[in-house]
Amino acid sequence: MQNNKMSMTDTLSLGFMTFAFFLGAGNLIFPPLAGFLAGENMSLAMVGFLLTAVTLPLITLIAVAKANGKIMGLLPPVAAMMLAVAIYIIIGPAFAAPRAGLVAYEMGFKPFIDFGDDTFTLLGLVLNSSQLLYTLIFFGIAMLLSLFPGKLLDSVGKVLTPIMLLLLLGLAVSVIVLPSGDIGQAVGEYQHSPLSKGILEGYNTMDTLASLIFGMLIIDILRKKGIEAPKEQTKYLVRAAFIAAAGLAFVYISLFYLGASAGSLAAGADNGGVILTNYVNVQFGAMGQLLLAAVVSLACLTTVVGLVSACAEYFNELMPSLSYKLLVVIMSLACVTVANVGLAQLINISIPVLVTVYPVAIALVAVTYLTEHFDRPALAHRLVLSVALIFGIIDGLKAAGLDMSVFDVMPMHSEGMAWLLPTGLVIIACLMIKRPKAQAVLN
């Protein structure tokens, strides 16, 4: 790589690395279950899911590039810091990273040591302690890879991701050639509102939140590779974003179809990981289970490496007295601690938080694209994000199980998207706000 240019191989590696950072726990466990529950309405549900799990992350990465990595630059410093800290904690040690480790354990390791219910006490103790041991090893490896961020492009983009892509390609082909059954009936909310349900299900991947972080991480990696010009950074980040989006869409579509055609394999499943594991066991036996374990472990590991690196970089800038390497260690230990809460509990806790925060992230991306069209961009950013947060809190409280029926009169409240119309109206109003003439002349 010379003269602020990247070779085609390096560009592809950057795209593969970006894809690998995104492809983690939620990307593998949510689509199969959504496909199964959507059944005959799979297409609409898939479109909604792809909107929030592929399209939004793509345009968010491009928005980060458009803002030269300073996407929160027009917010008050304290508000920008609070939003950034919240996002880093959510996608770092609080939810996304520990969840990735848990999914790697549940799908990539536990099936090989599950002795069933009728076990001796000693075997039961081994099974119970294996999660702690596994997460210690898993996050220990992630910590070692994260300690040397300059080598991320080489270790992830050129080595781990191509292996993972080949395994996923094999799985996708088998899903099409060897479906487990006929597509069933839609159930629950997928019967009457599959599109909006698919949109909300896409929140669970946390990819839009991650895009805000990964965009800045990729820019930092490009700087370390000698790409200093903002225009060149934007060009390569956009290319990486499209490569990652194409890969994610391919994975989601195949997993949606796997779930929709799972039939009896999905009986009693409470997450898509069970459906995916059952399918692989039936079609490919022990060897297939080993390959699935490899795919899941690689996918989750690369995601955690990206998340831990990004979080440590940010908090190092926020608190320079704490070194990057120390923060990597702290983040990794925090992930181990949270991961041992349990997968089901972690998912249940995260949903209300995501429903609250996602509208703010989406609104931030929207106003970033419209910044040059606002006469008063700083005011617009602050108003739009404030409204998105207020109504996001209402949706989040509803998702947490609180009685929010008083807001049923609001459009799309029942679908969990009460924030959409008010936020859109405020964006339109801000586009119409003009500077006073005297101030406009002075500027």
Image (cartoon, helix red, strand yellow):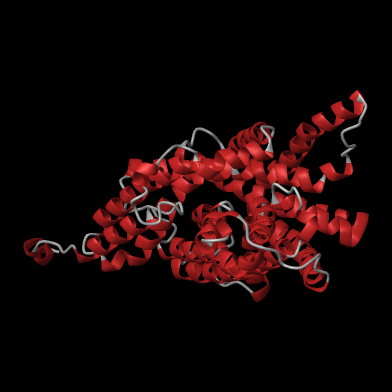
Which residue does the image show at 62% across and 51% down from the upper left? 306
Which residue is at 50% across, 33% downward? 321
Q: Residue at x 21, y 64 (%)?
A: 375
Horizontally, residue 367 falls left or right of residue 344, namely left
Residue 326 can be seen, yes or no: yes
Residue 67 place in picture, x, y as percent: 40, 61
Task: Please provide percent x and percent y for residue 84.
Answer: 44, 45
Is the residue 92 above or below the residue 371 in the image?
Answer: above
**In the picture, residue 396 is in which quadrant?**
top left
Q: Is residue 81 above or below residue 45?
A: above
Q: Is residue 218 left or right of residue 160?
A: left
Which residue is the extreme one toward the bottom?
8
Residue 359: x and y in percent read: 42, 53
Return the residue found at the far top. 121
Locate the N terminus and report the quarter of the image it occupies.
bottom right
Q: Tell which of 266 and 178 is nearer to you.
A: 266
In depth, the one of 200 and 265 nearer the eye is 265
- Screen quadrant of the C terminus: bottom left
Residue pictured at 82% horizontal, 44% vertical: 109
Locate residue 77: give its quadrant: top left
Above or below for 214 versus 432: above
Q: Where is residue 378? Give x, y as percent.
A: 26, 55
